[in-house]
Amino acid sequence: MAAVRRRERTVIPAGPPPPPPDAYELAEARGYGLTAGDLQHWYPLSAIEVHWARKHGLSPDAARRWAGEGVGVRDAVRAVRLRVMPAQVRPWAAAGFLPGDAVEAAEAGMTLAEATAWRQAGFILPDAALLVRDGWTLAEATIARFAGVNRYA
Amino acid sequence: MLSSQRNKLLCETGPGTPMGELLRRYWQPIAGVSEFERQDTKAVRIMGEDLVLYRDREGNYGLVDRHCPHRRADLVYGFTEDRGLRCNYHGWLWDHSGACLHQPFEETRHPEGTFKDKVRIKAYPVEAKAGLLWAYLGPQPAPLLPDWDRFYSRGYKQIAISEIPCNWFQCQENSIDPVHFEWLHSNWSMVLRGQDGPRSPTHTRLGFDEFDYGFVYRRVRADTTEDDELWTTGRVCLWPNCLYVGHFEWRVPIDDTSTLSVGWFIDELPGDASFEQQRIPCWHAPVRDEKTGRWIDTHVMNQDYIAWVGQGAIADRTLEHLGESDRGVIMLRKRMFDEMEAVAAGRDPLGTIRDPAVNDRVYLPIVGGLKRPAPSGGPQPFVFLAGQPDEVRSELEQAWQQCAAASAP
């Protein structure tokens, strides 16, 4: 069956031109208001990412830099808004977080140490970030989270 | 995990609540057009508001307060006229804009009176599209009713509606929860068939993207790679209360503890001869097995319903323990909070369309593309919901034969 092909994220097209989109990929691109040329120009980003990047003013080079760090366009757009730099996600990735978690944490004002503490208490980063945004401390959240379980301990 | 206050924000949809205000910025499907072939009025309850949906003899659809403003009689028992709905108690006549057109005894006693110009009934706009009737309960000017491209695909279409006894938001969270498919649908179905294995390939990676009309979720399983369309294209959590995976599943709040599940389905047909469907049937899908009293578990959406109602009438999110499979759910909640704030600040929320040039066969990502081949071997069994009426199945088979014959060499 025809399918939208994977666009290899680790390959930045410095040399050979990217493969032209086939009819199927082009149909998807058109759905997002893009042309074959757009897909080529933004290679290796996917059509939905190109659409989102253009909508939010993220350049192809910036999007590729973020992609090289493992951060998709959705998170890259937020990162730029928060003035997070691509290199800043590396310590997070090295600590076992998804690269995009660095952006989520920045939005909630969390440091890597704080995020690590939340993780050790059993909270995945986006859950922790939303709780922090809502004004919870780690101590409060830990007590609340395990209150139901501890009732039966 | 959420505080109970934040949970209420997500779940409560009555007038004046933040989520109620958000959802009222969107057109909501509330009934099938074909339901009005045999009735003129239908009682509907949407986001806690009791209303009557009707079609008058001129073909206007109206959605008005369930109770006549005169003495509060039930307008479901009113009768339609060329224009409007007349209360069966004292004959006051209301049109779809909410205007009172006639007050028989008042006008007899005071022909010069203007009483009818001083009373109105709550009324909301209704539009018909794709076999559905859509209502807009928000402030004017209303956005455009989305013109999704899938509505124009060639195929046999049908609508199925169920009432689910739980809050709408736990239904919608399912729309961005890829991993549940592995367990709720694949592995549990295997168990229900009395088999021990093999189990479904496990999910190994999830991805999420955002676009103008919601989120796309992507998955890699142990038996697929990033070359699979479930990763390259993904599936759509359609904002704010729908799942789109080639068919649509809207989750419309009836009130805070019940949800109208509105499914819009299409079966691809063989060949490429033109096919015009005269009417899109709308049927009501049962959720409970009458013999056993248990929830029906044989079909995909019925299995979803079991998960949702199992979470309680309103899921208590103060007690949950979220994990890696819930990243999409958290993203959805966060976006909902943001969009509630946007509405409170007077802005248009995500996904509202006001430009007619944009609202022309609006694209939604779809695995397999819009032009998909009909399955070989004839029409497939309807796997989504139990209770498909025989006449709907028969119509599909007739459509199939008609198209197959038209494209035969």
Image: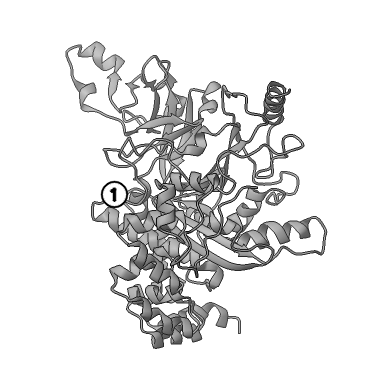
Q: Quadrant of the image for the C terminus of chain B?
A: top right
Question: Between residues A57 and A92, which one lies in front from this camera angle?
Answer: A57
- SS label for mark 1: loop
Q: Is residue B383 above or below residue A51?
A: above
Instruction: Give the residue number, with chain letter if any, for mark 1.
Output: B348
Write down the chain letter for disc 1. Answer: B
Q: Is residue B9 visible?
A: no
Question: Between residues B176 and B120, which one lies in front from this camera angle?
Answer: B176
Q: Which quarter of the picture shows residue B156?
A: top right
Q: Is residue B126 above or below residue B354?
A: above
Mark 1 Cα shell of 10 Å, populated few (<14), some (14-19), many (≥20)? some
Question: Between residues B170 and B5, which one lies in front from this camera angle?
Answer: B170
Q: Is residue A53 above or below residue B269?
A: below
Give how far across and how far down residue B269 sits, in percent.
65, 32
Give how far across and how far down residue B49 sits, in percent.
40, 42
Residue reaching furthest to the left: B112
Q: Is residue B340 visible?
A: yes
Give how far across and how far down residue A143 sits, in percent.
46, 83
Question: Between residues A37 and B286, which one lies in front from this camera angle?
Answer: A37
Residue at 71% in and 26% down? B404
